[in-house]
Image (cartoon, helix red, strand yellow):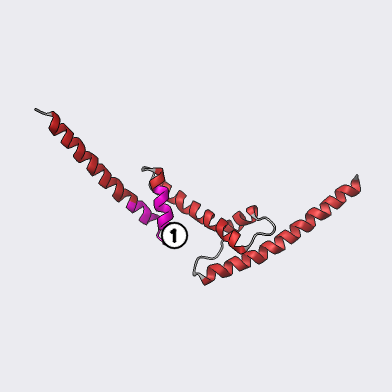
């Protein structure tokens, strides 16, 4: 039974080492892709996020998809903290649109506030119209 544990530990250690070597290669490849596309290189938090989700055999493009998910999630949380009111689906849609085009979270918040202001004005006009219709 002890020999079985020893074999299991060796196999686990071998898989971990193979996994970490391959991960490092894919991270270097991903950083190269990011540099070519003039995007920010990976930071420690992003690398940790990717390492926790890495599976043996993933390509740099698979990691890029995970990285997009991480960076978009961070962007989306920032927008939600800056703009706590509004339609969540509209906010998420605007976030995706603005994130893809490289805009900042503050620009998304400004757009949301502008749209909310327009909606409030329209509602206010409707209420005034309804109240003037009701009065004799």
Q: Residue furthest top?
A: 136
Q: To which residue does mark 1 refer? A: 100
Verify whether residue 93 appears in magenta: yes
Classify mark 1: helix, strand or loop.
helix
Which residue sits at x=36%, y=51%? 109
Q: Quadrant of the N terminus?
A: top right
Quadrant of the image occupied by residue 62: bottom right
Q: Is residue 120 left or right of residue 43?
A: left
Quadrant of the image occupied by residue 102: bottom left
Residue 129 sits above or below residue 21 on the image: above
Q: Is residue 67 left or right of residue 57?
A: left
Q: Is residue 58 left or right of residue 76?
A: right
Which residue sits at x=39%, y=48%? 91
For the residue pair 56 and 31, the one nearer the viewer reads as 56
Q: Which residues are magenta?
A: 91-111
Which residue sits at x=88%, y=48%? 4
Verify whether residue 37 appears in magenta: no
Residue 135, position as x, y percentages in the image: 11, 29
Q: What crowding class fits label 1: few (fewer than 14 Cα within 10 Å), some (14-19), or many (20 or more)?
A: few
Considering the whole magenta stretch, tell me its main secondary structure. helix
């Amino acid at each position: 039974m002890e020999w079985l544990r020893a074999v299991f530990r060796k196999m686990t250690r071998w898989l971990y080492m193979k996994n970490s070597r391959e991960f490092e290669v894919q991270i270097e490849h991903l950083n190269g892709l990011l540099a070519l596309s003039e995007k920010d290189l990976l930071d420690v938090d992003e690398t940790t996020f990717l390492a926790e989700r890495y599976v043996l055999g993933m390509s740099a493009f698979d990691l890029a998809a995970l990285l997009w998910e991480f960076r978009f999630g961070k962007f989306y949380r920032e927008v939600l903290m800056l703009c706590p009111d509004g339609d969540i689906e509209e906010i998420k849609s605007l976030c995706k649109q603005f994130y893809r085009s490289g805009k900042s979270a503050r620009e998304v918040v400004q757009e949301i506030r502008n749209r909310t202001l327009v909606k409030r004005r329209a509602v206010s006009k409707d209420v005034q119209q309804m109240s003037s219709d009701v009065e004799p």
